[in-house]
Amino acid sequence: MAADTIRVEQGTLRGTVTEDGAVASFLGVPYAQPPVGELRWRPPRTPAAWEGTRPAERFAPNSVQPSQPDHLAGGDYGLNGGAYAGMSEDCLYLNVWSGAADPDERRPVMVWFHHGAFIYGGPGVPIFDGAALARAGVVVVTVAYRLGRLGFLAHPGLSAESAEGSSGNYGLRDQICALEWLQRNVAAFGGDPDCVTVFGVSAGSTSTNLLMASPAARGLFHRAIGQSGALMGPLADNSRYSDMMQDLAAAEQTGLALGRAVGCDSIEELRRCSPADLLAVPPQQLQVHPQAPEPWVRAGAPVPRGALDLSYPIVDGAILPRAPFDVFAAGDQADVPLLTGAAANEGSSLPMIESVEDWIAHGHQEYGELGDRFLDLFPASPDDVLDVSRTSRADRVFVWQTWTAARMHARSGGSPTFYYHWSHVPPARLDPRFAIKTKGAYHGVELPYLFRNLGVHDWPWRGVDRSLSETASSYWMNFARSGDPNGPGLPSWSAFDPDRPTAMLLAEQPGMGEVPRRPQMDFWDDWYAEQRRQAAHEETGADRG
């Protein structure tokens, strides 16, 4: 029987055990001090000890976040973390599910970082409940971290007060702090600190990619799973491209713009400013070099909140000394097994371009000399322009990123890589704000399957859904145990070979097959290479100047 009381370095925790005694959960466990007051925009600090037994039976509040745009607001998507647990700057807590009856069991540990574009979400939504996976033999941990302007703001004043001369990336520092806390404490839950897997979807997947690239996270995890997210593009001082990263100097200008917008001339004043006032500033007001909005914003429509907000991970010189692409190209990323991939219709929920005329103009304006090739690969008619524009955006922002991470890790890393493509479509009945036009295997489609939480949704699940949930979650847990997803009774999954690439096709009948959409991926290779050439030319020109 799982124990409902354990001791960690700060004191004793009392959790909750399921009725059958198989799984204990410990919710709202502090892994750092509250980042409030003078600790706002500072690296996380070790939490204080407590006297007696601390209840760990309820989720803690999630990070402060803005209200969600309609295309993300559907509760069935699993994103509205704030709605479930409330919001607070005091948000640095994690949750643990374990079926270990003895702390010496040393079960594999799977650490989940939630999605939400580094702006929204939280770890306490029902779809992330770890009890089912814990019942199958792993320890599941979900982590809250600082988001948006409270989690990723850079500012010259913040850099000046830092011993590293850096700022921003506080949310990534939180993730690293949580992994450090788990190294010291996860054994108390029956977990193995030498067998830790980080995994996530979207921003959570991007987090695993950045953690692999960060020297500060080295040795804190031993496997990585990235589901539909990475940042493998070049650096860009250009707010149109949210799939590229800024460096510290560019990102600091956003902090200065925020200070001007709220009337705060110093860091001290900014730290006294209310979270509501910080979040109320429209993203467009923070653009240092105003340009046209993201191409996926419909002509004439208002810019969604967060669409142009530059409070994202940056190459800060400390947590991320270099862009992930450069780290992977040099083979300097964490040498751990990697499992990564994406869904077939990642962009099916995004607002996008709705007329053929706008689509053609976008192709030529956005891709220049490559515009004709782009429009040949993504031809659109009045009947399908919305879906085609969504597909192109998703290919670039989600699919190409994981495809590139897989190829680069397979070439430069010593550990194996496993690549997948999820095309199975659930029998979904989603919130119409999110899914009225959703088609196919949308962004985050795999979540109820991988957590074995199909029951979270009142959908007409079929036998094929339950079978795929068992298969896919078994792959993920096997990978967490050994760095290899294969196991008895499962279709064989071959390690990724960048010279002869194949993918595990997660469909009604899972099996290995060709990687879909290769011509489109080749196009993005060429387009991103051109962006790198332009960035290098601009940097050289600036140096000469």
Image (tube, rainbow, N blue to C red):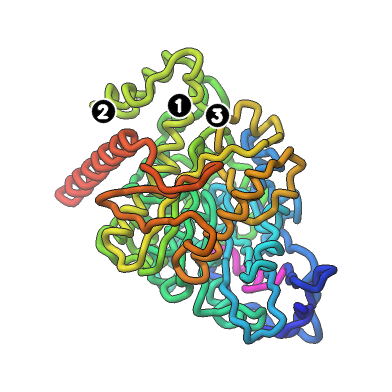
Query: Mark 2 belongs to which amino acid?
Result: Leu
Alpha-carbon neighbours of circle 3 within 10 Å: few (<14), some, or many (≥20)?
Answer: many
Alpha-carbon neighbours of circle 1 within 10 Å: few (<14), some, or many (≥20)?
Answer: many
Q: Mark 3 falls on what kind of element?
A: loop
Q: Residue at x 52, y 67 (%)?
A: 480
Percent from the top left, x then y, of residue 140? 63, 67
| Mark 3, residue position | 351
Q: Give the quadrant of residue 165.
A: bottom left
Gap between marks 2 and 1 measured at Cα: 16 Å
| Mark 2, residue position | 370
Identify the image quadrant of the N terminus. bottom right
Percent from the top left, x then y, of residue 363? 35, 24
Q: Residue at x 21, y 47 (%)?
A: 536
Q: Which residues are magenta?
A: 28-41
Closest to the camera, between mark 3 and mark 1, is 1
Q: Mark 2 falls on what kind of element?
A: helix
Q: Residue at x 31, y 22 (%)?
A: 376
Mark with earlier residue (2, 3) = 3
